[in-house]
Amino acid sequence: MSTHINEGAVKIIEIIGISSKSFDDAIVQALSKASKTVNGITGFEVIKHMASVEAGMIKQYKVNLKLAFPVV
């Protein structure tokens, strides 16, 4: 399937990826989980980065994403 949509419609959903490793890994986690139930993801937009802190150290990295996929 092409990643470029010429005609039709695209649906946008918002999810949060979570990782104990990095912001990049939080994105990978989000895409990996979402792709199990959402078919044809064509792109994403990072809305914001967040983190949970414990004892002065980052405990969890969180990334809020908007995912795009074609409506069929």
Image (cartoon, rainbow, N blue to C red):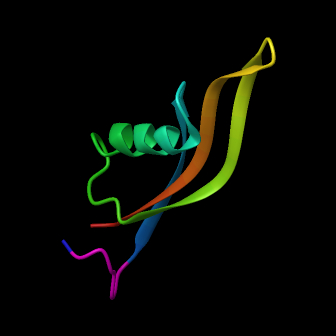
62 or 9: nearer the viewer: 62
Residue 39 placement (x, y as % from top left): 26, 54
Residue 50 placement (x, y as % from top left): 71, 38
The structure residue drawn at horizontal position 60% and vertical position 56%, both measured from the top left corner, is: 46
Residue furthest bottom in the image: 6
Instruction: Identify whether 27 is placed above or below 46.
Output: above
Instruction: Identify whether 57 is placed above or below 49.
Output: above
The structure residue drawn at horizontal position 27% and vertical position 40%, both measured from the top left corner, is: 36
Instruction: Identify whether 56 is placed above or below 69.
Output: above
The structure residue drawn at horizontal position 54% and vertical position 24%, both measured from the top left corner, is: 20
The structure residue drawn at horizontal position 32% and vertical position 48%, both measured from the top left corner, is: 38
Compared across the picture, whether 24 is left or right of 32 comes to: right
33 or 70: nearer the viewer: 33
Residue furthest top in the image: 55
Compared across the picture, whether 26 is left or right of 59 comes to: left
Type of secondary structure dominating the magenta stretch: loop
Compared across the picture, whether 34 is left or right of 60 comes to: left
Residue 13 placement (x, y as % from top left): 50, 53
Residue furthest right in the image: 56
Residue 35 placement (x, y as % from top left): 31, 46
Specify the quadrant that holds the C terminus: bottom left
Specify the quadrant that holds the N terminus: bottom left
Quadrant of residue 9 within the rendered picture: bottom left
Which residues are drawn in magenta?
2-8
Quadrant of residue 33 within the rendered picture: top left
Q: Is residue 18 magenta?
A: no
